[in-house]
Amino acid sequence: AQKITQTQPGMFVQEKEAVTLDCTYDTSDPSYGLFWYKQPSSGEMIFLIYQGSYDQQNATEGRYSLNFQKARKSANLVISASQLGDSAMYFCAMRETNTGFQKLVFGTGTRLLVSP
Amino acid sequence: EAGVTQSPTHLIKTRGQQATLRCSPISGHTSVYWYQQALGLGLQFLLWYDEGEERNRGNFPPRFSGRQFPNYSSELNVNALELEDSALYLCASSLMGLRAGTDTQYFGPGTRLTVL
């Protein structure tokens, strides 16, 4: 069964610094997709970045990049030049594609606090 | 372009009552997903609807049910409410659902259900 592990309950970073949020996954399916979402205190889940298991390059979206290490089954999110508005919960999620089911399995999340 | 919308924002019910939560997907999206985010339990997949049909269901009792309308909006019904049903219910939509290998899910702001 697929599983997502986020081992950092909380992370602190100063404004303008870079931060890495860890995510490891477990699946026996060779085809899968990995997602990162941000959840501010308002509750809405905001899609940040996606990485497919067969993608050759690490995904990047603006200040977000995904450090994808397939052999280690890790998909860490790197946020460069942190901003105060980055303070939120961050969830890593996975979807196995071969089952045909579109459900996402989420990790427990990491709370990021950006200080001035 | 409008995002996923959900109503109501908050809902307060008593044990044994029924709750109805509504979701409108992003225009053009045909798949709708429901997730429950309860304290201490994380984000759990509830239901997936695509083209009006229920395609997959998570590990929830039958008193959690729903439907998808011809305009692709969706309704989640929770019967015989229990205290542990108190949670944030998030709806997401995606463009292609069944027809995609991996399809990004975009979430709405959620409905916070409180059962007294």
Image: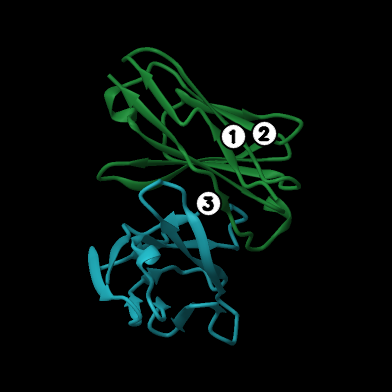
In front of the other: label 3 or label 1?
A: 1
Tag 1's secondary structure?
strand
Residue picked out by circle 3: A103
Question: Label 3 crowding class (10 Å Cα cut-off): few <14, some 14-19, many 20+?
Answer: many
Given residues B55 and A50, the one toward you in this image is: A50
- The residue that appears at 55% across and 68% down in the rendered structure is A32
- The residue that appears at 73% across and 39% down in the rendered structure is B51
Labelled pair 2, 1 in contact (Cβ < 8 Å): yes
Kindly identify the amino acid type of the residue bearing the numbered disc 1.
Answer: Cys
Rendering colour mode: by chain
Instruction: Indicate the chain coloured cyan by its letter.
Output: A
Residue B19: percent from left, percent from top? 46, 20
Image position of B105 with respect to B110: above or below:
below
Chain B representation colour = green
Tag 3's secondary structure?
loop
Q: Is residue A21 visible?
A: yes
Given residues B22 and A108, the one toward you in this image is: B22
Tag 2's secondary structure?
loop
Quarter of the image containing the N terminus of chain A?
bottom left
Give the spatial CA distance, label 2 vs label 1: 6 Å
Kindly identify the amino acid type of the residue bearing the numbered disc 2.
Answer: Ser
Residue A75: percent from left, percent from top? 42, 76
In front of the other: label 2 or label 3?
A: 2
Residue picked out by circle 2: B73
Q: Residue furthest front?
A: A116
Given residues A82 and B71, the one toward you in this image is: A82
Question: Label 1 crowding class (10 Å Cα cut-off): few <14, some 14-19, many 20+?
Answer: many
Q: Using the image, tell me which numbered label, if any, was put on residue B109.
A: none
- Marks 3 and 1 belong to one chain: no
Q: Chain of mark 3?
A: A
